[in-house]
Image: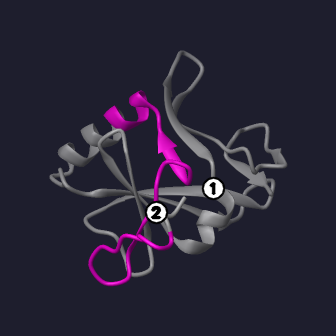
Amino acid sequence: MLAGRSGQKKESGSIRVGDERLVKLSERAAHKVQTLLERQGRPSGVLRVAVIGGGCSGLQYKMDLQDTPAQRDILVHSQGVQVVVDPKSALYVTGSELDYVETLEETGFKVHNPNAATTCSCGESFSA
């Protein structure tokens, strides 16, 4: 999750560095994120993963591409992609894996979250 407390790494400001125990990307997800960042002209940008209120089950994921992390973010390097999570969202996404699927039935990012007690049938929201 966070790098060891005694050797906790710091980036600029108060950005903390975590590891893939917080959130990790599959190879497919990382490739898609890198493609999107390059297409937007942000090759060194970050993927923000957040949890907000809403959806059928009460909580939903929000993903956004940004130029840099914000203050208090936790930064995780996964599959060559920089992923940032705010401290509140980290409580809900710890241990999650982000995948990208492209099939006849569905295309998009999917979050496999071990903390989700229930999920909506559409797969877009969850409860913890």
Q: Secondary structure at mark 2?
A: loop
Tell me if 98 is positioned left or right of 9 in this view. right
Mark 2 → mark 1, Cα distance in angstroms: 17 Å
Give the amino acid at mark 1.
Val
Check disc 2: other Cα within 10 Å, few if <14, some if 14-19, many if 20+.
some
**Residue sitting at x 63%, y 48%:** 95
* Closer to us: 102 or 127: 127
Q: Secondary structure at mark 1?
A: helix
Give the main secondary structure, helix, strand or loop, of the magenta stretch: loop
Indicate whether 99 appears above or below 59: above
Asked if the stretch drawn in magenta spans residue 8, the answer is yes
Check disc 1: other Cα within 10 Å, few if <14, some if 14-19, many if 20+.
many
Indicate whether 98 appears above or below 47: above
Q: Which residues are magenta?
A: 5-31
The N terminus sits in image quarter: bottom right
**Residue sitting at x 53%, y 50%:** 23
Tell me if 55 is positioned left or right of 57 in this view. left
**Residue sitting at x 79%, y 44%:** 119
Q: Which colour scheme appears in the figure?
A: one colour
* Closer to us: 84 or 95: 95
In this view, the mark in front (2 or 1): 2
Disc number placed over residue 93 in the picture, else none: 1
Q: According to the image, label 2 marks what residue?
A: 3
Asked if the stretch drawn in magenta spans residue 117, the answer is no
In the rendered image, residue 5, in percent from the top left (x then y), is placed at 50, 72
In the rendered image, residue 121, in percent from the top left (x then y), is placed at 79, 37
